[in-house]
Image (spheres, rainbow, N blue to C red):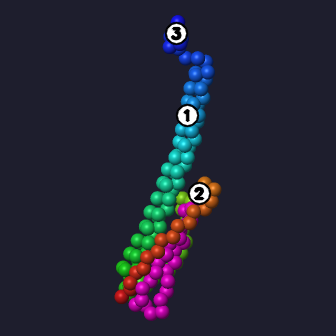
Amino acid sequence: MTRSDQGFTIVEVLVAVLVLTVGVTALVGSAGIVTRMIGQGRRTTQVAQRAERRLEILRQTALSATPQCTGLTGGTSTSGGITETWTVTTPVTPAQTRVLQVIVRYARVRSTGVDTLATSIRCN
């Protein structure tokens, strides 16, 4: 009988099983990280949408008032674990530009995330 007819040795089988085990363990570990990252991305998207929606509400309020930009005030709102805080600058003269800023705070895995959106509205 020649060496090629004998098949695999026990050492070769053990090495193959070890390599396969390491590969599967790495795959399982990375799957957990990817799942966490997808969850964080989903949460960040929700937060950005919430902040943008608040800015749109403030814009509509400012531009639909007579005279424009009256009735804008700052405030805070919390829902779904997301806290929005918005501020409106008050210019010296009523016809100047207002700066609207929305600060959004939300829970992350080991910390608190904070995102800020700002825009300006020209008042006539």
Q: Residue at position x 46%, y 74% from top?
A: 118
Residue 56 placement: quadrant: bottom left
Q: CA distance from mark 1 to mark 2?
A: 29 Å
Residue 24 picture location, percent across and down: 55, 34
State the residue in front, 79 or 50. 50
Q: Which residue is mark 2?
A: 108
Identify which amino acid the numbered label 3 is placed on. Thr
Q: Which residue is mark 3?
A: 2
Residue stretch in magenta: 82-108
Name, please, the residue furthest toward the bottom. 93
Q: CA distance from mark 1 to mark 3?
A: 34 Å
Main SS, magenta region, reads: strand
Identify which amino acid the numbered label 2 is placed on. Arg
Q: Secondary structure at mark 3?
A: loop
Residue 45 picture location, percent across and down: 46, 59
Q: Which residue is mark 1?
A: 24
Q: Secondary structure at mark 1?
A: helix
Q: Residue at position x 61%, y 23% from top?
A: 14
